[in-house]
Image (cartoon, grey):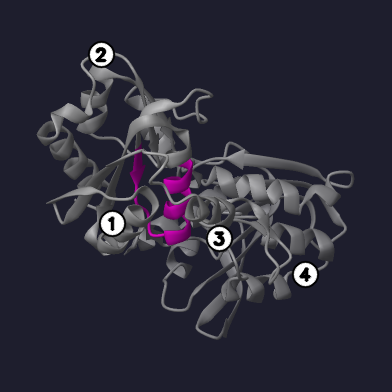
Amino acid sequence: MNEQESQAAALDVYLERESGLLPEAGGSALVYRAVPGDYLRRLGKAMDVDCIQTDKPLADELSRFGHVPGEQPAHPVRLAIVFATKHREEVLYHLALAAEHLEEGGTLIVTAANTLGAPSLERRTTELMGGVVSFCKHKCRVFHAVKRSDRMNRGLLQEWRRSGELRRIETTGYFSCPGLFSWKSIDLGSRLLADSLPVSLHGSGADLGAGYGYLSRMALERASGIKVLHLFEAERKALDAAKRNLAEFESRCELHFDWADVTAGLGVTGLDFVLMNPPFHVGRGALPALGRSFVQAALRALKPGGRLYMVANRHLPYEGEIQALSAAVESEVQDSGFKLIVARNG
């Protein structure tokens, strides 16, 4: 099992073990960074369940199981659950939101894999809520606390809430927030690619895995001939940031912000160019096939003669994938552990 599956399984065991945490009938539950799992069926028998998940592949998977992710409900909830992620500031932000959204006497549950810093999160939750009850299973910790306003650390809650919100980052000048790739510094590979983009870019293009819009903004600043630009990004919070970061270009260029799983296809064709710094990790594990699927999606969206501009870690073998799809590598430059590739389609 991966970390998400382990956390879901541990949570289900905990809910069975601590059956008193679930009301016999009524009430509502709110799950931050929800993932599929048997725990949802258990919750659904007792409560109305709202799921928060801004990652498109996971949101789609939840929808197939009948849990369409949405926004926080307007009313307080009886139970709030937080799934840990690798982004510590984001988890603390979700803990603060969950604590705020709970009704008095409501229960906060955290499920965290040991590899995601479960012991530290348990200590931080204790600081916030005034105490927790803890359980270990599937190399995870699951712990809960009851909301008592007179015991809650309000200063800590406000600090965690502020630190997780979308805001302009002083060191980069871009709007961003915890949970996004390279959220408070410009990724070196993306910077190398941006510096190499030609001023001759024109027509219609796409930025795959666009994040908070750094590559798109650099391309638009450099090339006035870009008329249409699609930003494809699986993390909805990143697109919210990208809209802020590219707002000044909306009068000049037709911008599309697509919350999408690139590996499922783009739904656009005939593009003049594609830009990308493809991911090759899922969670904390390396998955080079993810990057290869980005290459496939890019080349299938390009018109004949269209060009792919990409950066990748030097050891990742994307050239074979490019050639297998009848495209040609026109140039390749290696720099600082990365390689910059320009490929011509068809």
Quadrant where the image shows the C terminus = bottom right
Q: Residues within 10 Å of mark 1 (few under 14, many from 20)?
A: many
| Residue in front for this viewpoint, 174 or 193 | 174
Instruction: Determine contact: label 2, label 3, CB under 8 Å.
Output: no
Label 1 or label 3, whichever lies nearer to me, is: 1
Relative to 224, say whether 49 is above or below: above
- Coordinates of residue 34 in the picture (x, y in percent): 36, 38
- Coordinates of residue 242 in the picture (x, y in percent): 68, 50
Residue stretch in magenta: 81-97
Q: Say what secondary structure mark 2 lies in.
A: loop
Q: Of the numbered discs in the image, which one, if any, rests on residue 122?
A: 1
CA gap, disc 4 and disc 2: 62 Å
Relative to 155, say whether 32 is above or below: above
Who comes first in sequence, dot 4 or dot 3? 4
Q: Can you see residue 234?
A: yes
Who comes first in sequence, dot 2 or dot 1? 2
The residue indicated by pointer 3 is 327
Q: Say what secondary structure mark 4 lies in.
A: loop
CA gap, disc 2 and disc 3: 59 Å
CA gap, disc 2 and disc 1: 29 Å
| Residue in front for this viewpoint, 20 or 87 | 20
Instruction: Determine contact: label 1, label 3, CB under 8 Å.
Output: no
Label 4 or label 1, whichever lies nearer to me, is: 1
Q: Of the numbered discs in the image, which one, if any, rests on residue 198?
A: 4
170 left or right of 13? right
Q: Say what secondary structure mark 3 lies in.
A: loop
The residue indicated by pointer 2 is 25
Disc 4 marks a residue whose amino acid type is Pro
Disc 2 marks a residue whose amino acid type is Ala
Residue at the image point whose x is 55% and y is 47% from the top: 300
CA gap, disc 4 and disc 3: 20 Å
